[in-house]
Image (cartoon, rainbow, N blue to C red):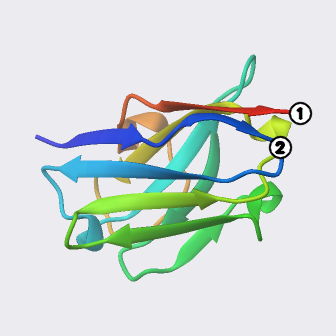
Amino acid sequence: QVELVESGGGLVQAGGSLRLSCAASGLTVSDSAMGWFRQGPGKERAFVSAMSWSGTEYYEDSVKGRFTVGRDGAQNMLFLKMNNLKPEDTAVYYCAAVKVGLSWSVRSAEEYYWGPGTQVTVSS
């Protein structure tokens, strides 16, 4: 049984930084394709960043150069370091793991395992 639990969200001023963590059980992070999505107020859930099994990184255009995805095999965790945060980054951030396959691609929601999410609020 796979379980993903996010942490590290909070309230931060524009220009600040946060580091999100996703603790995984029931799968091996370093052997999986995993990523981050977010859902802002009144918006649909959208892709943010991901890492394939081989370590290839993927980013949505608006976060390139500001966000960095990473993982720690020993802790079996996925991370998202977010710098220079903007008010438009305000959202619930979700950790996701591909159920079948090692490569990353944006798929339908049922093709992922999901965490419950963590709130990130950026004040102007």
Depth check: give the residue in front, 61 or 106: 61
Residue 79 image position (x, y, % from top left):
45, 59
The x, y position of residue 1, in whole percent, is: 10, 40
Foreground residue among 17 and 101: 17
Q: Quadrant of residue 75?
A: bottom left
The answer to whether 26 appears left or right of 6 in the picture is: left
Residue 53, image x and y in percent? 35, 75
Q: Position of residue 119 (x, y in %)?
A: 56, 29
Residue type, label 2: Ala
Task: Say if mark 2 contacts mark 1, CB within 8 Å.
Answer: yes
Against 36, is 87 above or below? above
Q: Indicate which disc residue 124 carries.
A: 1
The residue shown at (53%, 37%) is 9
Q: Which residue is mark 2?
A: 14
Label drawn at residue 90: none
Is disc 1 surrounded by few (<14), some (14 to 19) or many (20+) residues within 10 Å?
few
Instruction: Count the numbered circles shown.
Output: 2
Q: Earlier in the sequence, mark 2 or mark 1?
A: 2
- Location of the C terminus by quadrant is top right
